[in-house]
Amino acid sequence: MKALISLLTALCVTLPAAAQTEYRFSPVNQANIATAASYWNPIVAYVSEKSGVKLLLKLGRTSADTTAYVLAQEVDFAFTNHLFSPEREQLGWKVVGRRSTPPVHGQIVVAADSPITKLSQLEGKEVGFPGPEAFVAYKTTYAQLLQQKINVRTVFGGNMDGAFAQLFSGKVAAVGANSQLAEGYTKREGKQFRVLWSSEPYHDLALMVAPKVPERDAQAVARAFVGMASDPQGREILASVNKLIGLPADAVFIASDGQEYASYRRFYLSAPAALR
């Protein structure tokens, strides 16, 4: 009997511990992939450690990739504003946080030294956008061009940095932009813009969680993101990575229940069918 107990004890000792649940987190890539990875990797490492919930960063090359991952059910958390159309709200993703930055605007911009000074001068010209999923930079700006019956040739740059590069290389005459990202690009690259049109304000990307994630894990991750603001280590990480994308050093994550995104829902009520 003692020999049997000893054998069972040995087997219990050698059994592997239950694997920790891992969740994939995909933020919309608004910059080039190297900059985006440098921004998100320290944040994801911090949140994983503090929450006890392992997050794996799944970063796409283009701004549309995160939406593709969500629709294919390949990710569990996302940082996105691509899920507020009536159809996609049926997927059941929930807002649990956002950045503390002020609302952003969709803008149609040209280089500061461009001869173009009004929207009507874009008729027949090539205009750059990050991609077809970019709500602020593409949907709001392109809707304005359609409303004014200005025909342009659409060129997608993959992300906001790609679209800006096309503008300053002369490939496109103007760009549909996110005001926060345009300001950040000016800080990083020293490039100046002229704004031809600006939309109503919209809060930027939301921290969202899929309905399949247990509430306990979802709340632990949300608390860790929000908790960075009150933790010296978290604040230090944010101050460092915020510089990479031109955000204010004191930009942090705050809790949200999604009410701030009502303006997105209003947009879809009257948006052209092609942009819904």
Image (cartoon, rainbow, N blue to C red):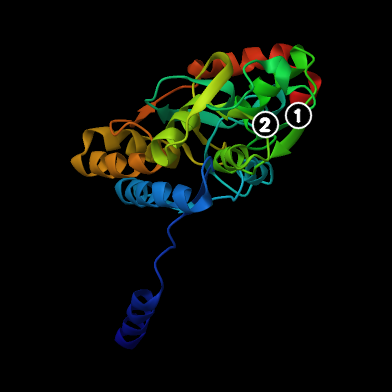
SS for dot 2: loop
Q: Residue furthest bottom?
A: 3
Asked which quadrant contains residue 137, the reply is top right
The residue to which callout 2 is attached is 173
* Residue located at (42% from left, 37% from top): 190
Along the viewing direction, whichever of 7 and 22 lies nearer the viewer? 22
Residue 91 lies, with reference to residue 18, above or below; the image says above
Q: Quadrant of the C terminus?
A: top right
Q: Which label number is shown at residue 70? A: none
**Amino acid of disc 2:** Ala
Asked which quadrant contains residue 93, the reply is top right
Along the viewing direction, whichever of 195 and 87 lies nearer the viewer? 195
Q: Which label number is shown at residue 125? A: 1
Name the spot of residue 121 as percent of width and height, x first: 72, 19
Q: Is residue 154 left or right of residue 184?
A: right
Name the spot of residue 186 as percent of width and height, x first: 44, 34
Residue 29 lies, with reference to residue 81, above or below; the image says below
Of the two numbered discs 1 and 2 on the same chain, state the one appearing first in sequence. Answer: 1
CB under 8 Å between discs 1 and 2: yes
* Residue located at (34% from left, 40% from top): 243
Total label count?
Answer: 2
Asked which quadrant contains residue 14, the reply is bottom left
Q: Is residue 131 left or right of residue 165?
A: right
Name the spot of residue 274 as percent of width and height, x first: 79, 25
Q: Is residue 83 visible?
A: no
Along the viewing direction, whichever of 206 and 35 lies nearer the viewer? 35
Name the spot of residue 73 as percent of width and height, x first: 65, 46
Q: Quadrant of the N terminus?
A: bottom left
* Residue located at (49% from left, 17% from top): 260
Badge 1 local density, few (<14 within 10 Å), some, or many (20+)? some
**Amino acid of disc 1:** Lys
